[in-house]
Image (cartoon, rainbow, N blue to C red):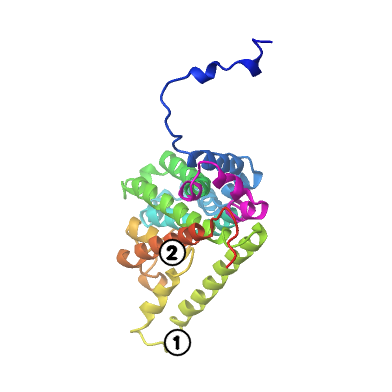
Amino acid sequence: MANAPIADLSYRNYDGALEPPSKRWTVIARHSIRRALKLKSFWVLSALSGWHFAIIAAWLYMMDNIAGATSPQFVEQFYKQVVWRDVLLNGIAAGQLMWMALGLVLGAGCIANDNRTNALLVYLSKPVGKGEYLLGKFVGLAVPLLLALAIPVTVFLVYGSLNWRGNGFLTDDPWMIPKTLVVLPVMAAFNAALLVGFSSLASNARVSGAVYAGFYFIIKFFVFLLTGAGRLHGMPEAIRPTLEKISYLSIDGLPYGFAKVVFGTDGSPFWIIKQGPEHVIARPPLFLVLPLIVGFGALGLGIAWSRIRAVEVVK
């Protein structure tokens, strides 16, 4: 019996270093990331978010194989009008609705469910501070969102470099990939910060998700009305550009405006041929869009920080 594990007190003789645990937030983040990657909805919505890229790729494939066999000069002239960074930008913008839905699936309950089950009592009773808990939740949501953004974009970039490099893909703008590496993390971090903030406001994932979705679509609707008003007949030309730039003041509009600034383009409609200036809305200035992204992202994290409590405080 003296050799039984319960009587083995040899561990008491340990006299090594007693260092505090570090990177405790990675445990929370790793759990959230693993949970996200196990969801079928994650992979389905990530694939569906690339619908625009799939249509463009299919259309260009038919263009090369059908029109290229009968009229190669037409195909050559066609490709000279293609602005590839606009194609990439449009594909990213087209996938934002799917990414919003994925954000609801992954982020609506990231803190709300902990509030509902009183899991914060467990988290914060351990050597985990509010900052570590919040960082773990934020990173655990931002990384899957970034991965969902990167999957269709990466497939498109690889497919394009293999098939359209001779038609200007990645050669008309050699910095397109580095610019993409700037845009995607900012979009993922911005949406993750907002979702964490909304999730902390409720004790039910459905409630926080409904509030976030309502906020998303209501703002988008009013922005759409104001932007449309700028194009009404008789609207003074002096205020039309201002009303058009209001289109960027929404949850999906701010990242889209930032992407336009980084890619250095005013964009084009959801088409592949460059259009005249009357069909596009000029990109916003960086000094306007970047502070708004940072500010609203910090606001979301600040709300979550104020709501993270081990016990309910009665005032």
Q: Which of 104 and 155 is in front in this view?
A: 104
Q: Residue 296 carries which label?
A: 2
Residue 114 sits above or below residue 22 on the image = below
Residue 96 in view, yes or no: no
Report the number of numbered marks: 2
- Whether 178 is among the magenta residues is no
Return the residue at label 1: 233
Q: Distance between the residues labelled 2 and 1?
A: 34 Å
The residue at 65%/10% (across/down) is: 2
- The x and y percentages for residue 48 are 59, 51
Taking the image as shown, residue 242 lies to the left or right of residue 123, namely left
> Looking at the rendering, in which quadrant would you find the N terminus?
top right
Q: Which of 187 and 313 is in front in this view?
A: 313
The residue at 40%/53% (across/down) is: 183
Residue 286 sits above or below residue 88 on the image = below
Front: mark 2 or 1: 2
Disc 1 crowd rating (10 Å Cα; few below 14, some 14-19, many 20+) is: few
Q: Which amino acid does label 1 sit on?
A: His
Please, what secondary structure does the residue beneath circle 1 have? loop
Q: Say which quarter of the image contains residue 97.
A: bottom right
- The x and y percentages for residue 22 are 44, 36
Main SS class of the magenta portion in the image? helix
The residue at 42%/48% (across/down) is: 72
> Looking at the rendering, in which quadrant would you find the C terminus?
bottom right
Please provide the residue range marked out in magenta.
105-134
